[in-house]
Image: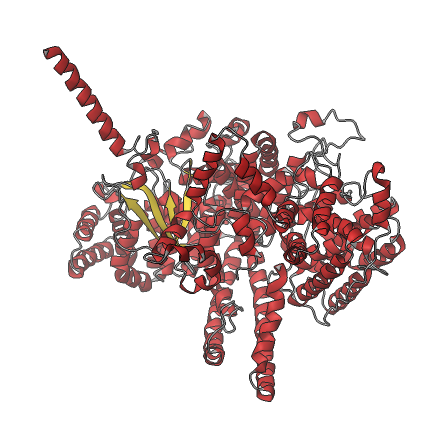
Amino acid sequence: MRGPRTTVERLDQPSAYFVNRNKRRRFDGKDQRDADDDVNMQPDQPEDDPLKDATTLYVGNLSFYTTEEQVYELFSKCGEIKRLVMGLDRIKKTPCGFCFVEYYTYQDALDCMKYIGGTKLDERIIRTDPDPGFIEGRQYGRGRSGGQVRDEYREDFDEGRGGVGRAVQQQRVRDRERQDNDDDYGRLR
Amino acid sequence: MADHDRRHGGGSSYNPKKRRYREDDDFDRRGPPRHQQQRRFDAPPHVRVRKQLIAIAENPMRPWHDEAQAIATLFTDNWDDELLRANFVDLVLQLAVEQPLKTPFTAAVVLLANVARPEVVDLLLGKLAGLVEGGIRAGEWRAVKMYLKLLGCLQGCLEGEGVFPVLEELFARAVDLQTASSEDTIGTEIVKIILLTLPYVMVAAPGQWQQKAADLMEKTEIIASEPHTLQALVEPYHPESGEDNTAPSQSLIGVLQTQLQNEANNGWELACLPRPWELPLGEVEQQSKLDSAAKHALPTITVPETVVAGSRPLFPEVFFSVYQNQEVESVPPITSAASCLIRDALVDTINVLHINRNITARHLIDLDCYFAPRTFTARATPFDKIRDIEPPKSSWKPEDVAVDAVFSQLFQLPNAEHKLVYYHSVLTEACKLAPAAIAPSLGRAIRYLYRNSQRLDYELTNRFMDWFAHHLSNFGFTWKWTEWVDDVELPDIDPRKAFIRGAIDKEIRLSFAQRIKNTLPDPYKELISPDKEKDVPDFKFADDDTPFAAEGREIAALLKRKAPDEEIDAVIQRIQSLAIDRDLDALVASTDVFVTCVLHVGSKSLSHVLAAIERTKDRLADAGAASDAARGQIISATMAYWSAHPGVAVSIIEKLLNYSILTPATVINWALVARAGATRGEALATAHIYELVFNTVVKVTTRIRQLALKPTPTPTPTPTPQPDTAAAAAPENAPATLDAEVTSMRALFGAIEDALVSWAAGSKDEMMEASDGDGDGDGDGDGEHERLVRRWGERWLRVFRRRAAIEEAFLVEAARERARRAAEDEGEDEAAAAAGGAAGKGVEGQEMVVEGEGA
């Protein structure tokens, strides 16, 4: 199906995240020199490509307040949705800004990459990435404080995703306390 | 080739992080960026040629002939580079079908290369002829058209009559097909291709082929001027019977034929087409070399005796524009060949570049780069300003032309080529790239469509509504709602009011009520009921005045704690006996309570309700199976519970259909008979009722299409390991299920037809009663109401009659295809018997030609 390289980039390709993670896995323990050849090995890859007929998409950069119904409304434009799993904060069990959308067909998932990834939902640009399929447990954030890792150390204030990162928030609280302590300390002297 | 390029060009093959870091490093060192410079000049010729050829004509500051000459020289100077030689030809061919706006420019490069290295043209023509032939055999008509366009641009370097024999051969097939059947669409398509190739031939070799062209057009006239039998299926407007300006849209080939006739009368001026092979006066020498360069024979292109429709169903086309009849001409008028030629190149661009909507949008914004200078006004010229443009100068706004082309595809009947959301995304990206230019054009398009929403086919009105809400959701929901504020006062059954209500509902579904309320002027806010702002709908059994309130609360509690079936059974029994006492339909009463409770328990989100349905699906199925009325009540209860959020109700009903708790017929009957009846027809003006019916029909027809294609699966790149066993098992089973499904699909369309005919004819009991009942008081109002309801009936009827017709056409085509495949298999078996295992290879080889098209 994959013909010669197209003259424009395709939007239905997996992101560097997945490709790299896979590559890392595949070449784990191998001699580094082998990795250089991996470009030439590509024609053999499709055999065990976990994304070959992937019908699931990872959807990222959602607002914490975006509901399932909103996701349904937008993503149904590419085909009927078989299953939708909202990403949850591991501790609070509230939405934490990502989800998995599963379609009935591979084509619908590809079309979604092309037509919906990078457009807005709930006034945020969302990200889509093909995914080998949902596994129980993956709905939870893997960050230290329960949310997504990317929200842990984020320094910009993002209203839709709980302000600044939690680690950053805590750091700031600590800084402030220390400052207060310092002040007290100084006064006592 | 691909691998090689990637390593040098993209730089993404190995660790991108490291690479980026190194580049930063380069900039930090104050000296000359040595590495960078080296890299740039190091790029081997085939990489540079590829890069430059792909980007050809994109830079408006660079004269076309300069650019083409530079690429041609780079190419011919490195003729000995074998990789480059092979890549060049393939790339020119690939660009022809991937970026059709650039075809004249790549053709110019080929023509210039022909001066120094005539061999390249032979190389190209060999492959090109093969691709045209393969395309014709496979029925890939758009690819054929795009390759012929390239060939047409090369007419100047072809021996003898060049492209004309191919066009004539194609025409002969078209005549055969058209005489054989008035419903033939392949012949129509072929004529379209001939007419769209001709202009490129005429500008590529000016002044030479006028007689030939005239002869050909005399022939096409007969087919082009005849209105097509199937044109009604694609007509975008559906005017009311009494309306005056009811001239139907003109067929595309009819329009083209007339336009080209005008061009022929004016010596084929074709002012809009680019002629990059015409060098400026200063380059007389080069021009004469170009003109006297070697001519080449076009290899024979055989057109098979029987041609096929290919993978895309063909329909006649009409010319659709949202900028027609403006007081100032902002797009080429329908009398000018520019309208069809530019549209054709844009539409091809849009439909082939679905793999990257950003590039599509870029091409649309840059479209003035690909046509003759002065074809358009400056980009982003405000509409008010084009009024002042004096005649010889063009008043065509490139943005309007681009937007018009996208809408022509979004509003293509019976179906758009891609999912509709693709066209949404193209408009979104275009609007992001050039908001100041595109947004006002979209605004005028929206106003046109809104003004004409009652004349537009109802399916298209709904596509418009869906796009409109989705588009606004990408741009902060800003729209000048104030200009329609008077229409808020209209009755709900008025088409404009129906549009407003539907659009606002769709906006809320993508966002939330409070947000949308804030974007609307006051009068609209009343359209958003307070119920829409509640997180969870009210549970009617919480109110003791509701019949069966206690029982309802009891069942909800039982469901919540996942109580065993018997406990629920007991309450249901009680409801049923109470209902009988009260003279109610017992099944309906208990179904209503039970369904409402399931919905209440799952009210938190769709996942919750789906889980609740999953747990209770047996009981729901039993309730549905008990009686028609109970089945209908499942829908009534769902719609009632989620009345503030009909989108949720529609999703739930879709899932209930998947579980076979509901049947498609129940949905149709509930919507078009029960619901429409209860509202005196007003339900027909409600967008989500249409959505419900339309989705149900699509669900049924999609399934049938899958079944119809199943016996012989479409060729996939992975060869089926044991074709005989798979093929032997399927055909025996499949037709039986298919036949059964087709019968029920026909029954479904029959039911839709019956229900809608009576609404359209005004013979519905509910309508008769209404007009009989209070004919004394406000008779006018009722007459108006009745007229509007009838009109809605007509509009619905047309949509679903068309659906039924195209499904029937599909079934005929699918049966033909199955027969063809079967015959092929048989032939293959015979051949296999004769020649051992060689036959399988033959078929594979044939497919290779089809697939290798882009090569």
Is B20 positioned to the left or the right of A89 in the image? right
**Residue found 70% across the figure and 46% down from its top:** B71
Q: How many marks?
A: 0
Where residue B170 appears, as percent x and y from the top left, is 76, 64
Residues B79 and B206: in front is: B79
Quarter of the picture containing the N terminus of chain B is bottom right
Where residue B242 appears, as percent x and y from the top left, is 66, 44
Instruction: Inspect this view and state whether residue A33 appears.
Output: yes
Type of colouring:
secondary structure
Instruction: Inspect this view and state whether residue B790 appears.
Output: no
Where residue B439 appears, as percent x and y from the top left, is 57, 32
Outermost residue toward the left? A188
Residues B98 and B419: in front is: B98
Is A168 positioned to the left or the right of B846 in the image? left
Residues B695 and B678: in front is: B695
Quarter of the picture containing the C terminus of chain B is bottom right
Is B343 positioned to the left or the right of B810 in the image? right
**Residue found 48% across the figure and 39% down from its top:** B469
A40 in relation to B321, above or below: below
Residues B253 and B599: in front is: B253
Where residue B353 appears, as percent x and y from the top left, is 58, 49
A62 in relation to B632, above or below: above
B418 in relation to B171, above or below: above
Is A184 positioned to the left or the right of B722 in the image? left
**Residue found 83% across the figure and 44% down from its top:** B286
